[in-house]
Image (spheres, rainbow, N blue to C red):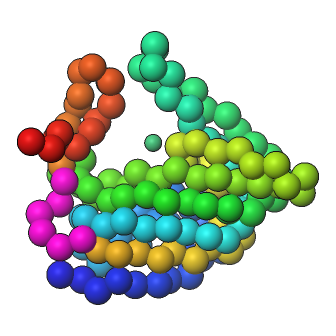
Amino acid sequence: MSDPFLVRLPKGDDLLEAVTRAFEERSISSASFTVIGAVIDAVVGYYDFETKSYRNREFKGDFEIVSCMGNVSLKDGRIFVHAHISLAGEDFACFGGHLMPGAAIFAAELMAAPVPGDANVREMDEPTGLALWRAAR
Ligand code: ZN
């Protein structure tokens, strides 16, 4: 089992990729985490329940990461990061959704809490069209 860890992610890296790499480097496949900091540009997804697909929107500019939280599990045998993010620009208005690749780190502090035990495994869930954890029984 790994201890909780705090790490500053590299400026200029893609936020989602850098978070994923932080867990891959430590071979951690089960964790919860938060990130605060700032990014340049961002792509945020909204899951359309009808079409069962993500609608992505690209935002250009400098943004505060008001909140970014997520979890780590296994999907197709690989470490998979699921993250949601709230961002705010110079008008202080928040927006957010599912974090997609496309946010360049200006500054980012990752606070991670590995979870002991077997990692949750993501599998296709037909009713939602999403790769979800197995339901609790
Ligand atoms: Zn999501």
Segment colored magenta: 115-120
Q: Quadrant of residue 10?
A: bottom right
Q: Residue furthest top?
A: 50
Is 116 in the magenta?
A: yes
Is 67 in the magenta?
A: no
Q: Main secondary structure of the magenta part?
A: loop
Q: Position of residue 58 (x, y in %)?
A: 70, 39
- In the picture, which quadrant includes the C terminus? top left
The residue at the point 17 percent across, 73 percent down is 116
Q: Is residue 77 left or right of residue 36?
A: left
Q: Position of residue 84 (x, y in %)?
A: 52, 50
Q: Position of residue 71 (x, y in %)?
A: 37, 58
Q: Could one spot residue 65 in this view of the protein?
A: yes
Q: Is residue 131 above or below residue 75?
A: above
The residue at the point 17 percent across, 39 percent down is 135
Q: Residue furthest front?
A: 137
Between 81 and 3, the one nearer to me in the picture? 3
The residue at the point 50 percent across, 22 percent down is 48
Q: Position of residue 8 (x, y in %)?
A: 56, 82
Q: Is residue 79 left or right of residue 19?
A: left
Between 42 and 136, the one nearer to me in the picture? 136
Between 31 and 57, the one nearer to me in the picture? 31
The residue at the point 71 percent across, 44 percent down is 95
